[in-house]
Image (cartoon, rainbow, N blue to C red):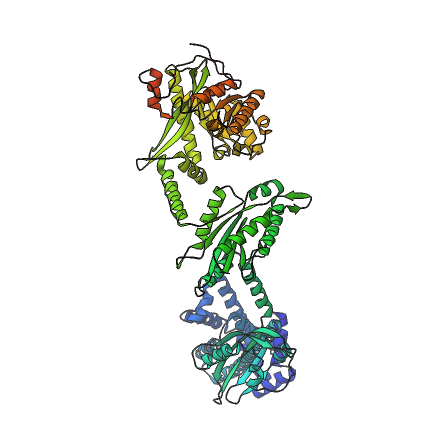
Amino acid sequence: MEDELKALLQRVGLGLDQILVRKRFLQWQAGDGVRLNRAAAELEPAHLAFIEKLYEHLSGFGQPSVMQNDAVGMARLKQRQQDYYRRLWRGPYERDYVRDRLLVGLVHQRMGVDLEWYLGAYRLYLSEMLRTLLGEGEQHAVYDSLLKIVFFDMILAIDTYSAAQRHALEDSEARLTRALRGSEDGIWEWDVERDELHLSERWTAMLAMPMQPSYCSRSWFERVHPDDLPGLREAIADHLNGRSPSLAHEYRVRTESGDYLWVLVRGVAERCEQGTLRMAGSQTDISARKAAEECLRHAARHDALTGLANRLHLDELLREVQQRPHGRAAALLFIDLDRFKLINDSLGHAAGDQVLVDVAQRLLCCLRPGDHLARFGGDEFVALLGDLACEADAERVAQRMLVALREPLQLGERTLSVSASIGIAPLQREGQALNVLQAADLALYRAKSAGKDQFALFCDGLHSKAARQLELESALAQALARREFALHYQPICRVEHGQPYLLGVEALLRWRFNDTPVAPSEFIPVLEESREIVRVGEWVLREACRQVRCWQQAGQTQLYCAVNLSIRQLQQVDFAELLARVLRETGLPPHSLLLEITETLLMHDSEMMLNCLHEIAALGVRLALDDFGTGYCSLGYLKRYPLHVLKVDRSFIAAAPDDADSVAISRAIIGLGQSLGLAVVAEGVERSEQIEFLVAQGCQTVQGYWFSPPRPAAELQSLFDGTRSADGLWGLRHARQTLPSCAAVQPVPG
């Protein structure tokens, strides 16, 4: 406050000489001060009464009444006002008096008390003092002296307000100057009718133009980029004609060196007092922002890793191609790398990213001029082929891609083999636009299902197949709750001296949808893909254990149950706990349960999978490797995993003993299993010659339609009871034997 007061004294310009001049002008004499001093004590009560009366009066008005909400502040204000009146009457009226009066004015100005309220309070004060002092001549003289000093104070107060206002105005102008300098904006003013254009130094420096007093609008507009000039003129005309409240437009303007800057011009037009139309505003260099926006636009439409177009840009390219006049053919290739997840999992994502970059470059080299390649996401790419002479050209491009990707890929010291599956779809079919991404994706799925590392063409049947799969997926999600699933059981027998003995049953899932049976080969893959297999698999496990335990308690004491496991079930972290709980709840002995897994499952070869299988084996549950020989399972897996049973796939048994290759493979698998101490089971036995062949090879445990097809539990129960027989069943009867955990079962004659 002290610094502000000093600055205010300087602004008011009240030196000693000026103070004396003002006193002399008001006819202030020494006697005036003496008179006031003599009356000061007598007026103390009047001052106290006036202060209370003043604030009571002010409470009825808006602005001053706000101050009264602060009781503490109000008490302090009243005390200061009383001190003010004492000083007013007692003096002394020297330089310090002037300083204190200016301080009072500054405080009131800081408090937001407007000048009219300030002067109005003085008027009230004088009126009150008039009633107090009006009387004899001497009293009149006293009051006359009072008027002189009061109005002296009023002039000081007015000076305080004026100086403070000037200071605020100068501060405002300084802030504006700093803001303009900080923003580096160029300022301009245009006398529209006289066509005089005044430009600031910053405006001309921005374009490296020579500085001169004034220009014409041609100096401005001739520098505007030809493509942007119509838009700028239209924006100016819209504002001048009242169609927009102000001018705000972005355009390119040429510098003296011939380069172009992006600028943002803002302005407003108004009529001056002389009636002329003037327009003024600023111009900002926004080249950096435009460059950043262009980078963002590119980033928004391109893949950061490969630099290819992304899905957003692909949509734009697709619309562009589809809007062309119909003529030559166009097609879309949906490309998905085969088993790319294995690269990420084994070598890490950094290596996976490098593979994607190399793959992108190989794919680009297979395209023709005018074709486009986009990264759709993950390890998926999309190629948009326009201007095809025929649809077969798309197949040739796809074949080039497959060949290019098969070339070994060098990644540091590693050499990788990469392949892809490709779905091909035309953009139009019989003159009608296709949902080409969906169509190509369906064709891709067809290529993968056919064995990968190949391309497949879209056909109308794929839509119906996809619709069927969606229908099944939706229905399967409700099938368990609707009790549409059932288990059928196929006997597993041991052949001794031409007589089959029942060892166990394999539980097989069956489903009736809309009262129609659906083939397992159709609905099981849908369960797997939708992960519904986890819930359904738990139901199968629980129901099979319950049923076999019932049969054991009814007399088939040594009967065991085989249940197929999905990889998704084994990926559940608590599967072993679930299995133990099911065995406890159903009462089935652990050795009476055989869980069948496939080669595909073993090929994941993860620590989690291995640990889970060891936990299962630790429970006493046996494990069987199903469909052995149909995949690419390493023989090392047979020792790495806790397996007990090896099942020979039906595809080898079906051709034996007539086909030499099938005989050789079957004989090798049986011998391998026996040499590793595994029990061997042959599936798909349908003829007596197959039984003779298997028994001759030392494989006596078999299952297949020759003994019985899979049957509902009730039908199989009737066979156990001997109430009915089944075609092809060799007089099944209970074999009393103890099942060891791994070696081939030795029957105990009944």
* 361 in relation to 41, above or below: above
Please tell me which residue lies in front, 543 or 717: 717
Task: List x then y, in percent, for residue 663.
Answer: 52, 26
Would you say 521 lies left or right of 409 here?
Answer: left
Res. 28 visible in picture? no
Q: Nearer the viewer, residue 227 or 215?
A: 227
Left or right placement of residue 413 versus residue 577 in this view = right
Picture quarter with the N terminus:
bottom right
Q: Position of residue 631 (x, y in %)?
A: 53, 34
Q: Position of residue 159 (x, y in %)?
A: 56, 80
Task: Say left or right for 687 vs 201.
Answer: left
Q: Quadrant of the C terminus?
A: top left
Front residue (pair 315, 518): 518
The image shows residue 144 at horizontal and vertical percentages of 51, 84
Q: Nearer the viewer, residue 715 or 230?
A: 715
Task: State whether residue 82 is above or below residue 474.
Answer: below
Residue 735 in view here? yes
**Residue placed farthest to the right in the image?**
413
Q: Residue furthest top?
A: 750
Up the image or down, 454 lies above or below 285; here it is: above
Number of marks present in the image shown: 0
* Residue drawn at point x = 63 percent, y = 70 percent: 2
**Left or right of residue 371: residue 442:** left
